[in-house]
Amino acid sequence: MGSGKKIVPLQFSYSCGLFECGGEIYQRLPGTLLLRIDPIRSQVIRDRLESKICSCCRGEMLIVHCMTHKDEVTPTTFYWACDGCGFFKFAMSNQVLAGRDIDLPFIKEFDSRNEVPSLSQLSVVINQNRDRLYTMDPTRFEVFVGSILRDFYQCEVHHVGRSGDDGIDLIVIVGENPLMVQVKRRTKSHSTEGIEVVKLLFASVFGQGGNSAMVVTTASRFSRPSHTWIANPQLRDLKFQMQLVDVNSLMSMINAVRSNGSPLPWETHWDSHKFGVRYDYSEFQPGTWQHIPLEDGDLLVDLTNQESPRLLAWSHHKLDSCVEITGSQENFQSVQCAEMAFDDLLHKYGDQAVVGTCRVNYQYFLDVESVPAVAMTPLITRWRSLFPEAMVDQMDWC
């Protein structure tokens, strides 16, 4: 059996400050400057903002905060948040400029090929209405249970459930022996989980050399033969442990996970007052950032951390995208001198061997919150000179 996909909570590395006005979308830059985003990507952003489906886990986006005012000056603010993974969207009307400010969170550390978003945020909804357990999509329920087990045991969990999974939906890496879990989402709250499920899971786990198993179900109870069977002395002789978790026991785990009091991602965003982009001049140290103009692009080099420098690169064909590269000082020096060739989706550098030893992030937007405004000044000055049609100053609209 393969390792499946690791369940990981999404870490929203940064949020991109955008502004929508007159049918166009802009990215906020230091001061009052805006960078116009091309129409195709603007429509993608608009669709993402208006969609009621989460782009990360396909959950439901709900309005979780709305602050409206009768006057025409005070902004109206909205938050939409996914009830599962915690992804959120923020919009605030700007009556003065007849537009709206938008914040969309972005995730740098996530590999969709090998990872699946944790759905532990669903514990909030389930605490309020446990009946949702009985109508949840079975696969989504498996990931939700895996997310709860991950937080409850503070361990690594992999979702392996699929057709022909031999009854094993989750692998919980806790202790010396992996705990193999079968998840059953029953549609009736008064149902009873029978002994057949317990025996089949034992056969699958024991056949694969395991000795620890768990059945998690939305049934209200397990049958008496099920409890009798797992207490069989022969299982103890085999050093095999079987846990039976009915809906009440599952709810206890859910309550324990939710009671840790950690704020939701949108609440953190709200509390930090990150409306748009904030710029911190105090952290800028002269000489740690360097602007390198290229014939067909620009580089910003961050040497704050000498052991792991950072490079941000733009093509003049696509100002609203950038590539971030980090690596060792030795490899980084070669990358600095590499000529760039950009494709619409794939960013290529001349020195592929060097890039292969570094870490590359392809970003739709620059994480300007982590770049001091002073460091971006020469870059923006060049852009305003070469591409005046792409740069807009909000002061011109006032």
Image (cartoon, helix red, strand yellow):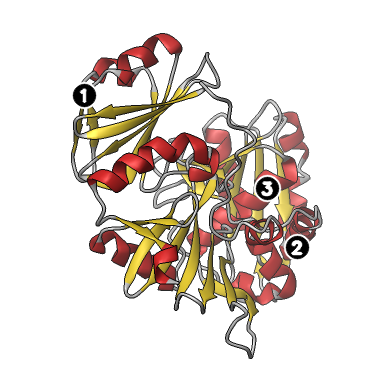
Residue 339: which disc?
1
The residue located at (52%, 32%) in the rendering is 208
Image quadrant holding the C terminus, namely bottom left
Occupied quadrant, residue 28: bottom left
Looking at the image, is mark 1 or mark 2 nearer the viewer? 1
Image quadrant holding the N terminus, namely top left
Confirm or deny contact between disc 3 and disc 2 (CB under 8 A).
Answer: no
**CA gap, disc 1 to disc 3?**
48 Å
The residue located at (78%, 45%) in the rendering is 231
Point out the tag, 1 or 2, that comes first from the N-terminus: 2
Q: Is residue 341 above or below residue 335?
A: below
Q: Amino acid at mark 3?
A: Leu
Residue 251: which disc?
2
Q: Is residue 353 above or below residue 344?
A: above
Point out the tag, 1 or 3, that comes first from the N-terminus: 3
Image coordinates of residue 305 in percent, x first then y, are: 55, 19
Q: Amino acid at mark 2?
A: Met
Residue 149: which disc?
3
At numbered mark 2, what does the secondary structure look like: helix, strand or loop?
A: helix
Residue lying at the far bottom in this picture: please name it: 70
Image coordinates of residue 100 in percent, x first then y, are: 47, 72
Image coordinates of residue 315 in percent, x first then y, are: 25, 38
Image coordinates of residue 134 in percent, x first then y, are: 60, 73
Occupied quadrant, residue 86: bottom right
Q: Amino acid at mark 1?
A: Glu
Looking at the image, is mark 1 or mark 3 nearer the viewer? 1
Confirm or deny contact between disc 1 and disc 2 (CB under 8 A).
Answer: no
Q: Is residue 354 above or below residue 184?
A: above
